[in-house]
Amino acid sequence: MAINYSCKTSGHTMARRSFLGGMLTGAGAVVGGLGAFTAPKVYAKLNRDQKRIVVFNMHGGLSQLESWDPKPGTDTGGPTRAISTSVPGIQIADTLPHTAKQMHNLCLVRSVNTRNGDHGKGRYMMLTGRRQTPAADFPEIGAVAAKTLNPLQSSLPGHIRITPGGSGGRGNDSAYLGPKYASISLDGGKPPQNTTLPKNLTELGDSERNRFRQFANTSFLERRRTAMTDAFTYSYEQAAQLMKQREIFDVSKESEKDVARYGKHDFGRHCLLARRLLENNICFVQVSHSNYDTHNENFNFHLEQLEEFDSPFATFVSDLADRGMLESTLIVVLSEFGRTPRINDRYGRDHWGNAWSVTLGGCGIASGAAFGKTNENGTKVTDGEIDHRHLFHTYLAAVGVDPTGSFNIGGRDMLMADPEGHAIKEILV
Amino acid sequence: MVDSPPNRNIKQAHVIHQWKHGSPLIDCRFDPSGRFVFASSEDNSVQRWDLSDDSKFSLLAHDSWVFSIEHSLDSRWTITGGGDGRLVWWQTASEESKPARTIEAHQGWIRSLAVSPDGKRLASAGNDKVIRLWDIENGTLQEELPGHERHLYCIRFHPTDSNILLSGDILASLKQWDLSTLRVTRDFDCKSLHTYNTGQKVDFGGVRAIAVSLDGKYLAAGGLHKASNPLGSVHEPLDLIFDWESGKLLQSCVSEKIRSVIWRQLFIDQNTVMAVSGGTSGGFLHFWTPASAKEIHQFKLPKHARGMDLHFDGLQVATTHSDGQLRITRLVAKED
């Protein structure tokens, strides 16, 4: 089955080439946070066909009752209250006052039932749209986005993860799509590893070295070119381009004013970096916020964590809307599962995948909407039950990729999304 | 409170009574007259039990959990502070479940209340990181004390000086305020009560409980330490006892191999701190003195404990529990 790439129109190709050409020749202007684009509408016109996805991964299992589906005054509600949002009739938890003001740009899905309470399995399900089995491995949404949305001639990686910490490097999350589409981690929000020249190597020396490599490569490829050698060559070329465009990943180039707006803590900087990457046409960015695995003192921890999340996230959504980027950028706020309605002895909530929430917004998604329902105290989905498979289909459909399409891998068609799922049509526009 | 009643024997502590409520309980207080015990619940109510006849009465006015309950010294007023940011005044002995006064006092939760020893002032601490001082009789806002950078967990007045207020937050910043100047006059070093877990990216701990001995000689700040897994409740209780005059840390009191956090504590005599803790190990009353890091006694409660108060007779301890029970423990030998 042919893949319905969203970026195949000639107009798009021209715009993209023009944009990338500008980036390569005038990097200074572009890497300054697209400061050259003083008129947001001009920016939006240039980029409207380039679709992007940003995922906020609420690591550990965000409580739906302390965020998108509060149940105040019930036996499961805890001390959390519901507040009005910018959309009449939709209320969310009082832990998210800034996000509440952006509800007209968002869409709540309150009827997720993944029947899973395991961290690893839940993470896999939510990012691949499949259940984990020993029989097969599937690429994460970031790899699929990099494969389907990233311009073919893009010199930048299409799959970026911004994490609070870690050792950096490439992820093992692209399965059969191969390492070309695996994530590059910006751990701690720092630029990719090994993208500066060693101190003992001059730019001229590096250039000569690359020229020799390319010469040797060309000779070799004339006789023995394979998909593997292409991927190898691509890695070198991408690394070279990464080094040239390293500033795209450097959030310190953003204005002091923006740094202050987003907050001078890690998550604020990571949201600002995500905006910067998306503005530079990175087609998939995943931002992690840690940690919501609150078996103990759930309410204290959610207050602390969501206070840190709320303002930068709302600023991010507002900025994308102001810049005309929401039309082309899908926002997803997910977790590996939700948390139990029952409050345990230690004021904690435990793992729960049977009735929880995911929030979407932007590209292809109905704005200011709430889909699905849970019962009065949140113990059961009562309307519009969906799971990870439906969400994965929806992400792809929202950015114009046919989720029933397949990848041709070594002559074998691999379905992009679980064939037993389907997109949630009610929230697609 | 009676200081050291002659028949008190903490090592003979035993539960003598329990009342069941239909929802888990949070915190509790005896009224100063000793007639009632009030307990807040996860159903947003406050329950009042009459010790003389076991009768129960519900107070309903909050839209969130009530984290703190205090009384005017004459027992006339019961004041509750909730997660809805409201302060509610109730007539303590009234049979009407109607608040006498409701004030939208804070943005976000009110976590802690305290009454000055002269009985004139009520202090409230909120998630807006501000302490507010109120006239306890008419509810007039008197002063605001900003200064904490993170969520406030606990406030207490000095037992004999109404111009001294103590406040502690999640980062274990413990401040001493002079209310005549509205300034911080001293910070106590309670860093060992705070943990930042780099793996989980969470701040945890803080000053959960403050007590000053009746003679003003000692200050105790309680909470937890050894938080190797804050989100999973792997931590142990810790109580820091300071010399008030010098501010010097005298003792770091521990309870080894118990996984819990100190929720509240009181000095039951000039030297002995009684603290209640709850966690994965269950519920406990701990007894410490400045002379030793180890407990002089530990009493295991039947279930996870969350709140505690001492009757004015100095013998009856009320504790609130996650199983919805309010339990009364007597600190004396069992009667035959």
Image (cartoon, helix red, strand yellow):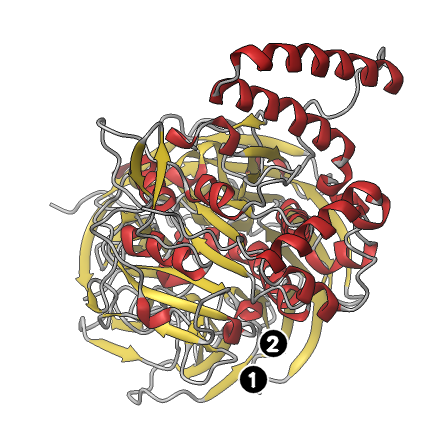
- Residue B156 appears in the picture as rendered: yes
- Assess whether mark 2 and mark 1 are in contact (beta carbons under 8 angstroms): yes
Q: Which amino acid does label 1 sit on?
A: Glu
The residue that disc 1 covers is: B137
Disc 1, SS: loop
Front residue of A172/A202: it is A202
Position in image of residue A288 (x %, y %): 52, 44
Q: What residue is disc 2 on?
A: B120
Which residue is pictured at 31% across the width and 68% down the height?
A: A425
Circle 2 sits in a helix, a strand or a loop, which is it?
A: loop
In the rendered structure, the answer to whether residue A67 lies left or right of residue A30 reads left
Q: Is residue A176 above or below residue A401?
A: above
Q: Is residue A225 left or right of residue A394?
A: right
The quadrant of the picture occupied by the N terminus of chain B is bottom left
Task: Say which quarter of the image contains residue B203.
Answer: top right
Instruction: Please name the residue shown 79% across and 15% down the image.
Output: A198
Pick whichever, A346 or B96, lies toward us: A346
